[in-house]
């Protein structure tokens, strides 16, 4: 196996790039060098300080243009003293590669880049292979994959199908792939009352008790019982704050935050309207003024089971001996942006150590993942 297509070495080289969002740290430079050496046409699509890389082998606009999407940015290391090896040292011990990004998702990027290079150099396909890699998946995600897709639209570049290489398997390699994701939104509530002495509560308007009641009502509400391909939607109260250090003062304001993960029975606009209605009811009942600010990370989406998911599932089963469940569970990923461009599915490694101290991946799994990706490419272009 050449150094160009060894996915373990490439993963290690990428881990050594300390690309904590938004730092590029040489990761995309390294990938561009490897891809250009294999005949890919590469373009940096940087925007607002975020580094992104687009690479294409083959004819622009070919109706069969298979794409891979992933990210090289990583989360901070946390407590460095808690690591048993250098977080950016890419140490291999007992067949396990350690380092920040080993699991999420430099191994996935290395595997699909290596598979793509092997394909185009060994059995050039009738079609195009596209690699779209961002440095902003772990951040705000406003100038990462969105920037790549904006640029592709302006340049008439297109993928006919896409595989996102995020870790998708909970415990066993091959057990799960993603055909969609729940939507995600956050609502920030502010309740404003009248400050007063706690010994004379009738002279104040207490926003804390009103906020606590509203949050309890929201948390107790059943949004739905799930849909055909999705688990029930969830609403979690994540914080209630006053910033009040005095035990004898009723504060004037209280804030709270809720996070909603919603299935295809809802959209963010309808949920925002419902939250506003509940806040209005709470205000009418308590005499407390409520204000809401919302942030939508993504709508729910799903790629209907069909040729793409069939190809990925069949290949994964053949290579791992495990038939993957077609899932929509978990958090958000950049597939939420790609789904508006073309059919998209996700498949990658076991994700148990994502974002943890001593993040790690079995070397054999990286090699197996490259094999899966290569066979998917073979099957797509057959």
Image: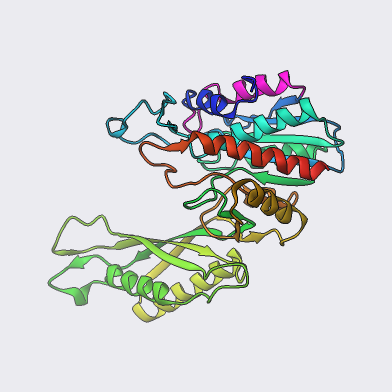
Q: Is residue 143 visible?
A: no
Image coordinates for residue 288, horizontal then vertical, percent: 35, 72
Q: Residue at x 54, y 67 (%)?
A: 272
- The span picked out in magenta is 19-39
Query: Quarter-wise, where is residue 157 in the image?
Result: top right
Residue 30 is a magenta residue: yes
User: Going by the image, does 317 lie left or right of 98?
Assistant: right
The quadrant of the image that shows the C terminus is: top right
**Residue ranking furthest to the bottom:** 285
Residue at 47 percent of width and 77 percent of height:
222
Q: Which residue corresponds to the image point at 72% horizontal and 62% vertical from the top-left?
A: 304
Q: Front-most of 51 and 58?
A: 58
Q: At x 60% / y 25%, what residue is drawn?
A: 6
Above/below status of 206 relative to 167 = below
Measuring from the top left, give residue 334's x and y in whole percent. Answer: 61, 46
Image position, residue 351 (x, y; %): 48, 46
């Amino acid at each position: 196996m050449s150094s160009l297509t060894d996915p373990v070495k490439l993963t290690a080289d990428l881990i050594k790039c300390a690309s904590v969002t938004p730092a590029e740290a040489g990761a995309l430079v390294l990938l561009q060098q490897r891809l250009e050496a294999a005949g890919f046409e590469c373009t940096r699509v940087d925007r607002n300080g975020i580094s992104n890389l687009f690479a294409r082998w083959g004819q622009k606009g070919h109706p069969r243009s298979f794409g891979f999407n992933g990210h090289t940015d990583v989360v901070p290391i946390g407590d460095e003293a808690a690591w048993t090896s250098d977080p950016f040292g890419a140490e291999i011990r007992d067949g396990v590669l350690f380092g920040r990004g080993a699991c999420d998702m430099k191994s996935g990027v290395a595997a699909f880049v290596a598979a793509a290079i092997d394909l185009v150099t060994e059995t050039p396909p009738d079609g195009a292979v596209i690699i779209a890699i961002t440095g902003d998946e772990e951040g705000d995600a406003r100038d990462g994959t969105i920037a790549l897709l904006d640029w592709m639209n302006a340049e008439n570049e297109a993928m006919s199908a896409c595989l996102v290489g995020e870790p998708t398997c909970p415990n066993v390699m091959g057990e799960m792939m993603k055909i969609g994701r729940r939507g995600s939104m956050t609502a920030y509530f502010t309740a404003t009352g009248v400050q007063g002495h706690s010994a004379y509560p009738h002279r104040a308007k207490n926003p804390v008790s009103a906020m606590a009641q509203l949050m309890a009502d929201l948390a107790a509400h059943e949004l739905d019982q799930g849909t055909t391909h999705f688990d029930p939607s969830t609403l979690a109260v994540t914080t209630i704050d006053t910033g009040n250090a005095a035990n004898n003062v009723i504060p004037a304001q209280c804030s709270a935050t809720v996070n909603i993960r919603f299935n295809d029975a809802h959209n963010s606009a309808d949920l925002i309207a419902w939250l506003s209605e509940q806040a209005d009811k709470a205000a009418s009942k308590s005499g407390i003024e409520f204000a809401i600010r919302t942030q939508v990370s993504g709508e729910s989406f799903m790629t209907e089971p069909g040729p793409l998911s069939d190809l990925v599932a069949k290949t994964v089963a053949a290579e791992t001996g495990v038939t993957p469940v077609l899932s929509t569970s978990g958090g958000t990923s950049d597939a939420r942006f790609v789904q508006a461009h073309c059919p998209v599915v996700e498949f990658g490694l076991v994700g148990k150590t994502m974002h943890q101290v001593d993040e790690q991946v079995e070397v054999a799994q990286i090699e197996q993942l490259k094999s899966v990706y290569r066979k998917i490419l073979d099957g797509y272009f057959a």
